[in-house]
Amino acid sequence: MVNKSRLFTACCIALVTTAMTFAIRAGILSKLGTEFGLSGPQLGFINSMAFWGFPLATVLGGFLYNRVGARNLMIVAFICHLLGLLLTIFAGGYWGLLISTFFIGFANGSVEAGANPLIAGMYANDQSTWLNKFHVWFPGGIVIGALLSGLMTNMNTSWQLQIAVMLVPAIMYGVLIFGQKFPVNNYLEEDTGKNIKSLFAPLFIFMAICMTLTATTELGTQQWIEKILGKAGAHPMLILAMITGLMAVGRYFAGPVIHRLNPTGVLWGSAIIATFALVLMSQATGAMVYVAAILFAIGVMYFWPTMLGFVSEYMPNTGALGLGVMGAAGMFATGLWQPVIGGWLDTEKQNALNEGLSSDAAELVAGQATLDNLAVFPAILILAFGLLYFYVRKKYGKRKTHQS
């Protein structure tokens, strides 16, 4: 007998593990740079390995899902999490960090490749709501990771021990999935050929492009939060915990919001709020940083799961492959932008130093300039999601939220 509750719990803990890798890595980024003498672009390339391993896993998982199923993909995730975390702990420099971070990224992508279609199939009548409930645990895991990282940093704990903490949730979800019966797919299109053909539909291509912008807006900002806001008069890891905590609450109660506005309305409104929040954050210092961070959380909280929910509901013929490609598009684009963001920070800081500013003032200016650059991504989405909203309303009707 399939224990849906246990499987859903296992998926959620796996996503907590995924999220903690983002949060704790963000918290120890400066330590890694100092210990190994790494530049901003080098740190960006290390970050990129997580974002590039992720899309490789989601695309491969999407292609293989019909053949190997969710269970095997979750087992791959578990093994790669253990391998990536242990290799990180014993890394001796730049190349060791690159390789170990790639394994972690591949594990994170395998979680998404297995869990998203599994949950969409188990709760086929309300996919967007349950995918949002599942993705509660990405920001939820970041809260846990950010608070642990901040606490352990204040206690002068080594970065290796901070990495080791993530072995606990990894082992927990491994225990929950081994020996469990997984459901037979009863919702997704299982013909991989049809899945591939559906990926070339104009609407899917449009959504995949939008996914690159939504993911970079959310994750590109969060991954560099410590360096962007380090001198803004607010505690960066507290800001990260607050943002992701609000995101978790918002996603848990996403059902009424999505049913009220439909997925396209949610996406359009999110883009507007996210753009305003990043512009405000780029000008704020002290207490106003927290206000801007609250708005940013509201702006990005529904992006990732609602994008997946939209594709699952409106384009079910893309199957598990469609969900995998969407996740891959988001993470791959975010990975591409990581060295660029690191370069922005280094360049803007050097320009400020050349103008005679102190080191702290230069870091503040660099962070604010980088936030201005990041605000361009959701600004483009305002137009894109506005067009999507009216297209869907015209084609499916005002209250239509699922393709028949």
Image (cartoon, rainbow, N blue to C red):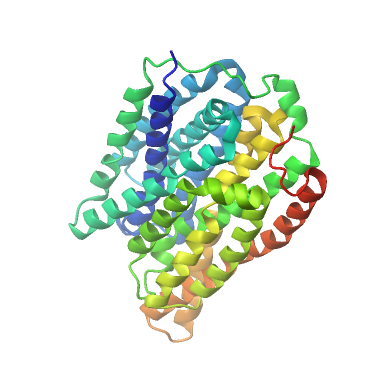
Task: Residue at 44% x, 54% y: name it.
Answer: 43
Left or right: 332, with 233 as reference point: right
Quadrant of residue 76 in the image?
top left
Left or right: 113, with 249 as reference point: right
Q: Seen from this angle, which residue lies furthest top?
A: 1
Task: Residue at 79% x, 37% y: name it.
Answer: 201
Q: Seen from this angle, which residue lies furthest right?
A: 394
Residue 336 visible from this viewpoint: no
| Quadrant (top left/top right/bottom left/bottom right) for the N terminus | top left
Q: Seen from this angle, which residue lies furthest bottom?
A: 356
Q: Seen from this angle, which residue lies furthest left?
A: 155
**Residue 280: where, in percent of width, then height?**
52, 74
Task: Residue at 44% x, 17% y: name it.
Answer: 2
Q: From the viewer's perspective, is residue 40 above or below residue 180? A: below
Q: Nearer the viewer, residue 237 or 275?
A: 275
**Residue 39: where, in percent of width, then height?**
43, 60
Q: From the viewer's perspective, is residue 88 above or below residue 216? A: above
| Quadrant (top left/top right/bottom left/bottom right) for the C terminus | top right
Residue 17 visible from this viewpoint: yes
Q: From the viewer's perspective, is residue 110 above or below residue 191? A: below
Q: Nearer the viewer, residue 333 or 199?
A: 199
Task: Residue at 45% x, 66% y: name it.
Answer: 293
